[in-house]
């Protein structure tokens, strides 16, 4: 192979992505009762025309009380499918595969939108609060609401809700489902010893803390078609005292692979404070080592995410065997046409070819007449 690996197709089960560049799930907090709005169609149209291989719809609640905020998208009722399908169809027109990230906010729900502070909603305000839930009755921080400790019957109901959301994701036409097991939300809170103090089969040692994530993966895989890939987003490490080490996530990835998960989306943090609204300085590609560790330790494909900005870095991550896919979030907001600019930077013979033909035609002609 002589061309950039970033622009080499990747086959996952029955799906072949035209390149390795992924639009990461980015919460917009602009849904109404879980339904997507015009903003969501406009947001995704930018990426549908830009040459990405795969694009995610944001973290989407499997139930009303599984949202993070009142502005989060939902997939807990059939009426929400049509809007999501419209997004999928827009991408499909231009050869971009689509994914949806489904999850439950757990003890981190009932919060204000990020630009309103992201703290728990106060009772008596303009928007109603709801009861948060978790593996144990431990608040995220001192002074925060105490979540209801889920009993085993309620856990079974949650598994059923994930199954129903997966079936709706299929009805909407998504190519990929990703289970959100990161950032302090419900599934991650079961896996992390920081938030899980249970003494039944869902807690205690590593095997017990894995039970809920593995139940979800098994149930989702059972109803998600064999030819369609299943992803799992993990907070690879908690980055807090007593939190998850990378070794635990590698062990989880081994078990997830055995249950039909195809790709681990390697993020980190979120057990104490938002993972994506960090205030400390971070280096570019700071989470890449986690993707590399999971890929080699569990022998599973991984997706690297987190401040991957430069095309040269993205290409090096793939060539060095650290990951199989490169996910971009805020960089796509800064530069929606990142695939085109990456193709230029990496010396693709016709960088315009990554774009729809209606754009490529004119850019190719311009390239021929530009003076060196």
Image (cartoon, rainbow, N blue to C red):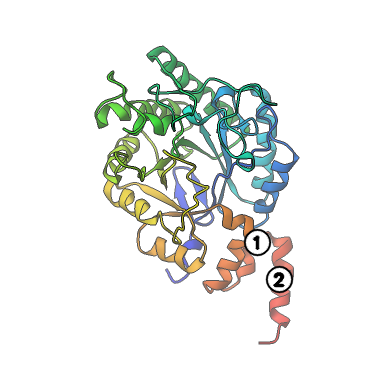
Residue 150 position within the rendered picture, expressed as x and y whole percent measured from the top left:
41, 17
**Circle 2 Cα neighbour tier, 10 Å, few/some/many (<14 / 14–19 / ≥20):** some
Outermost residue on the front side: it is: 143
Q: Quadrant of residue 219?
A: top left
Name the quarter where the N terminus is drawn. bottom left
185 sits left or right of 242 in the view: right
| Residue 203: x %, y % from top left | 30, 24
In the rendered image, the vertical position of residue 340 relative to residue 65, given as above or below: below
Q: Is residue 155 above or below residue 271?
A: above
**Tag 2's secondary structure?**
helix
Provide the secondary structure element on which disc 1 rests.
loop
Residue 365 image position (x, y, % from top left)? 73, 75
Discs 2, 1 touching: Cβ within 8 Å: yes
Q: Which residue is mark 2?
A: 363
Is residue 344 visible to the viewer in this orientation of the structure? yes
Q: Name the residue beneath numbered marker 1.
A: 355
Q: Residue at x 72, y 63 (%)?
A: 359
Q: Label 2 vs label 1: CA separation?
A: 10 Å
Residue 262 found in image quarter? top left
Residue in the image at 34% along x and 46% along y: 300
Q: Is residue 187 above or below residue 334?
A: above
């Amino acid at each position: 192979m002589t061309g950039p690996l970033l622009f080499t197709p990747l086959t996952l089960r029955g799906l072949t992505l035209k390149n390795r560049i992924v639009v990461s799930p980015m919460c917009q907090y602009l849904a109404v009762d879980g339904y997507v709005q015009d903003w969501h169609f406009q947001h995704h149209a930018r990426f549908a025309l830009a040459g990405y291989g795969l694009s995610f719809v944001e973290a989407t609640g499997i139930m009303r009380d599984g949202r993070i905020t009142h502005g989060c998208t939902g997939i807990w009722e059939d009426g929400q499918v049509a809007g999501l399908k419209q997004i999928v169809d827009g991408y499909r027109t231009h050869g971009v595969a689509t994914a949806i990230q489904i999850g439950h906010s757990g003890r981190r729900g009932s919060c204000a939108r990020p630009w309103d502070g992201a703290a728990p909603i106060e009772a008596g305000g303009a928007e109603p609060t709801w009861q948060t839930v978790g593996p144990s009755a431990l608040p995220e921080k001192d002074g925060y609401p105490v979540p209801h400790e889920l009993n085993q019957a309620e856990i079974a109901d949650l598994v059923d809700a994930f199954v129903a959301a997966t079936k709706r994701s299929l009805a909407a036409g998504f190519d990929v489902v990703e289970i959100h097991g990161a950032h302090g939300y419900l599934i991650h809170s079961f896996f992390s010893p920081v938030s899980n103090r249970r003494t039944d089969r869902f807690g205690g040692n590593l095997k017990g803390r894995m039970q809920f994530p593995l139940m979800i993966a098994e149930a989702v895989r059972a109803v998600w078609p064999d030819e369609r890939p299943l992803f799992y987003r993990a907070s690879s490490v908690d980055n807090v005292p007593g939190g998850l080490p990378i070794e635990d996530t590698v062990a989880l990835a081994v078990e997830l692979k055995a249950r039909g998960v195809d790709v681990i989306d390697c993020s980190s943090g979120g057990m104490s404070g938002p993972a994506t609204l960090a205030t400390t300085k971070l280096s570019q590609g700071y989470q890449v080592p986690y993707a590399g560790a999971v890929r080699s330790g569990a022998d599973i494909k991984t997706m690297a995410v987190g401040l991957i900005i430069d095309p040269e870095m993205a290409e090096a991550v793939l060539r060095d065997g650290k990951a199989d896919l490169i996910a971009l979030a805020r960089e796509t907001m800064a530069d929606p046409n990142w695939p085109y600019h990456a193709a230029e930077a990496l010396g693709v013979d016709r960088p315009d070819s990554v774009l729809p033909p209606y754009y490529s035609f004119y850019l190719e002609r311009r390239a021929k007449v530009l003076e060196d």
